[in-house]
Image (cartoon, rainbow, N blue to C red):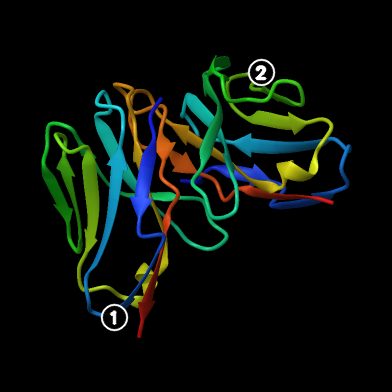
């Protein structure tokens, strides 16, 4: 089955700097890759996603890139703010409708003021 | 619009006791998921419902775990008897139709003593 790895496990950046989180997946049939943000005591919330027919997607300060050949995708956050501090999870889905996600282990991002 | 509702938010029980978690998905969402999230890890799917039908329960430990979604709306996940290793956060999520986006509830944190 699908296996998703995520690096780094923890990341500290200064406010205003950029943060990059990388994920790799194993199943070449995966075609949907969401990123979720989880704040303390809350459930994960979708922040951005990308499908296999797209190489890059951007939404304000957040961008995701996908390299299908290498089976890796990355989350980029620019101009980080303290409220970006949270745990970020990547996921991959081999299902056409993205129903069965396999999540990575998560990255704890700390934005230092 | 109300989000996914879960109760209780916290539960402490002794091992070998039964426990039940309740989830009410977003109105109109036909797909419901139960995930297990261990400390420092990503969510892992336990069971997925399409309306009242469990379409994927391959990861549900059926010797002690059970779930139901009788009217295709809210759902209950039960553990009987609970073991120490069941201590975790149990997340419920829902999605609509063929949409990829899953909306998560805040989770129930279970502690088994």
Q: Is residue A17 left or right of residue B82?
A: left
Q: Position of residue A48 (x, y in %)?
A: 27, 48
Q: Is residue B56 left or right of residue B109?
A: left
Please state which of residues A87 and A82 is positioned toward the viewer in this rendering.
A87
* In the rendered image, the vertical position of residue A96 relative to residue A51, given as above or below: above
Residue B91, picture quadrant: top right
The residue at which mark 2 appears reads as: B70
State the SS at label 2: loop
Dot 2: chain letter: B
The residue at which mark 1 appears reads as: A15
Q: Is residue B51 left or right of residue A99?
A: right
Residue drawn where x is 20% and y is 64% of the image: A61
Outermost residue on the bottom side: it is A113
State the SS at label 1: loop
Q: Badge 1, how many Cα within 10 Å: few under 14, some, many 20+?
A: some
Q: Nearer the viewer, mark 1 or mark 2?
A: 1
């Amino acid at each position: 089955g699908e296996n998703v790895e995520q690096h780094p496990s923890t990341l500290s950046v200064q406010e205003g700097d950029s943060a990059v989180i990388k994920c790799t997946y194993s199943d070449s049939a995966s075609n949907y890759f969401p990123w979720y943000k989880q704040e303390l005591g809350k459930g994960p919330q979708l922040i951005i996603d990308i499908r296999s027919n797209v190489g890059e997607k951007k939404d304000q300060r957040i961008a995701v890139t996908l390299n299908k050949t290498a089976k890796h995708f990355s989350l980029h956050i620019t101009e980080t703010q303290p409220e970006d501090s949270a745990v970020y999870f990547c996921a991959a889905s081999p299902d056409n409708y993205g129903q069965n996600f396999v999540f990575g282990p998560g990255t704890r991002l700390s934005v230092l003021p | 619009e109300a989000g996914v509702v879960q109760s209780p938010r916290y539960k402490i029980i002794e091992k070998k006791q039964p426990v039940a978690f309740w989830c009410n998905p977003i109105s109109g969402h036909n797909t419901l998921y139960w995930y297990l999230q261990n400390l420092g890890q990503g969510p892992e799917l336990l069971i997925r419902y399409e309306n009242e039908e469990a379409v994927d329960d391959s990861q549900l430990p059926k010797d002690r775990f059970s779930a139901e979604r009788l009217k295709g709306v809210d759902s209950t996940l039960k553990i009987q008897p609970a073991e120490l290793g069941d201590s975790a956060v149990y997340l419920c999520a829902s999605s609509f139709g063929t949409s990829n986006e899953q909306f998560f509830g805040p989770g129930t944190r279970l502690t088994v003593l």
